[in-house]
Structure formats: structure tokens, C-alpha cells
Image (tube, grey):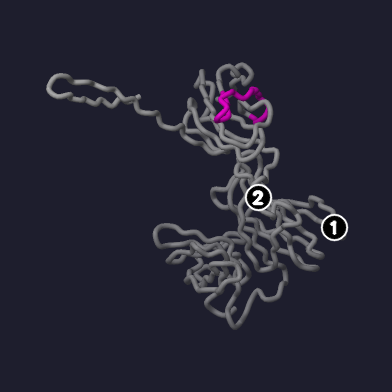
Amino acid sequence: MKQLIVNVVVGTVAVVTIAVSSGCGSLPAARVGSTLDSGNTKVKIAMGSKGLIFVAQKLSGKADCDSLKRSLSVSISEDGIGKNVTTNSVCDFIKGNLVVSSKVAVNKGDYTINIKRINDRAFKDNPQVYAKYEDPDFAGGSSYLVDGAKELTTGQALKGGVSYPNGNATEWIRLKGRNVGAGLTFILAPEAKDIKAELYDTGLDGKALKLVGTLTPKKKKIVRVSNSNMLVKVSAKPYGGAGEYSLVRADQGSAGTTSVARGLKIPVIDCYQVGDNNSVVLLQAVNGVKVNDEVSVFGRKSSGGETVAIGSCQVTSIVGTQASCKMEGSVTGYVEYHAESAKAG
């Protein structure tokens, strides 16, 4: 605690010294789903919805979890109330972790967590703070429901994102079309973790929902679509799954994938800036795309808005179904992209 010393001179006779105490700073805030900065710390946490709040601490080597329960002290209190939440220490919740959790679900609100490790050698890395929400999609839009699924047609590249800690753990995507073989490629952003994509069939009546397969990142899969009956469910795994993804569709034998007048049509998987004035464009490696090809990139700043030319780039590499293209300039600020080869196909 700091003191401000103020000397007050009263005439020429006396000097009075007054000590004024300054207030303490606020506690650091931590996000649900994050790793804390220290093994001994006190932080603020915001619960976005009702659920269990817990701290997970990795064990070092072959440490016996049950014997270490007294070596990790965790107290959780709701701000404004002050009374500690009843906690429970368990060893079978997350493999290789000692977990201290609220015994019952806590309400949405702000909480203070105080962590003290008595035996640091028994633990590995800093603790992580998580939530097990009763509704993992409490903040999701309409696409977390089957009836609100996004739609994907041939030649499109759909971008999205899911996050369990942020309350939007699920997105549904409907494959539009009739009697076609939909070629799907699922791409995860580099920072994404614990995200999966599953295939569901709604059946002839459109009411069933049967799991029929999964999508492996960066591997193209052909899915038979009879009558817009196939759905893709992209979900973030509990309790820290989060990140952005792209789902690219290029159907087998679909018309319109090439055009003599405007060159080869190339679906764009993703775009991102590298450095101050350079960008990388990831393309679907459709038939005809080759290394050193010149490609023009176009974009729209709003859905259904005017298409504008962003720039041109050169294909530098092709790996599997994905081609990398480097260009000068920025590709940020657009919501939809597509590319065309500079020469006719």
C-alpha cells in the first residue's frame, strides 16, 4: 500500500504531516477456457451462463492424484456475495489432471478464483480455468439449430467459427442439391483446436437425424446428396474447443466449374495477411490449377454486394486439395471471395 505524504505549513509555527493511503488495483481478469499466468494467483472470471466452474491442474509425471488433493487449494466466490462456493476435488474428470470444481452449477455472473499450490513439483504447467455449461450454445445464433442451418451449394467456400468457452459450440450446415456427389474439404485455421465436423442424414422424410460419417481436415470427401438431405455439424469439444474453419464444396461432374470466357473458376478456402503488405490466399486445387499460374482474386464487402477486384497472385504450391497463392496487398475487410485464372481454361 502506498502513502502520500503531505506537509502543511501553518503560518511559521507548526508543520503537520498527513498520511493518505491509496487504494489497491483491481484483480486481473481471465477468460473461461484459458491458461492462467501463474500456479499461485487470484483472478476474476465471468461465467456467461449457468454451469460448473472448475480449475484443471496437470500432474507431473506419474504423480498420484488422490494424494495431492490437499496440495492444490482453490476457492471460488461470487462477486458481491462473498461467500465461497462449495467445491469438490476429483481425479477422473480430465485425464492426467487434478480438477477442483464447484459442487453444483453456479449462475451467470462474475466470480473470483484464488489458487494456491502447496507442492509445485507435483504439478506441470500452470492451471487452466474452464466451465461446463448446461447450455453450450447459450450465445449461438440460429445456426446452432438444425432448422437454422447455413446452406452450402457447389462452388462455395463457407467460413465460420465455434467456441465452447464463448457459448457458441455448434454450427449446422445443410448441403443443398439433388442427386449429386458433393465434394467437401474441411479446413481448420492454424490456431483452432478440438473442433470436429460430422455428417448427418435427415432421411427421406427430412425428420430423422442419423450420424453417417466425419470429415477429416484437409482431406476431400465425396458425400451423396439426394434431396438436400445431408447436414454437416461443426462443433467445439468441451471444454476449451474453439477456432475458425472453412468448408469448401466442389461437386463431382458439376457444371460451371470452368469458363472459357473468364478462365477457370477457383473456390477460395481462406485468406489472411502476412507482414505489412502481403497476403496468402488458399485455393481449392480444382483440375487445371498448376504451380506458377496467375490468379485474380475478387471479393465482396457485404453479402450480395458489389464484386470488386482485390488483386492478382501466383500459385506457389499445391498440397492435396489445397493450393497456396501469394499476393501483394491486403485481403482483409471482405466477407466473400472467389478467384479466377488469368487465362482461359
* Label 1, label 2: how far apart the Cα atoms are: 26 Å
Where does residue 126 sit, x and y in percent of width and height?
51, 30
Query: Which residue carries the number 2 mark?
Result: 140
Please report the residue visible at 56 percent of the width from the left and 32 percent of the height from the top: 111
Where does residue 84 sit, x and y in percent of width and height?
59, 23
On residue 116, which mark appears? Answer: none
Q: Quadrant of the N terminus?
A: top left
Please check the rendered image and state whether residue 83 is part of the magenta-colored stretch, yes or no. yes
Label 1 CA crowd tier, 10 Å (few <14, some 14–19, many 20+): some
Closer to us: 137 or 287: 137
Query: Which residue carries the number 1 mark?
Result: 203
Residue 293 appearing in the image: yes
Against 104, residue 252 (above or below) is below
Residue 9 in the figure: left or right of residue 78: left
Where does residue 4 sit, x and y in percent of width and height?
28, 27
Closer to us: 9 or 262: 9
Specify start and end residues of the magenta stretch as a single range: 75-95
Residue 59 appearing in the image: no
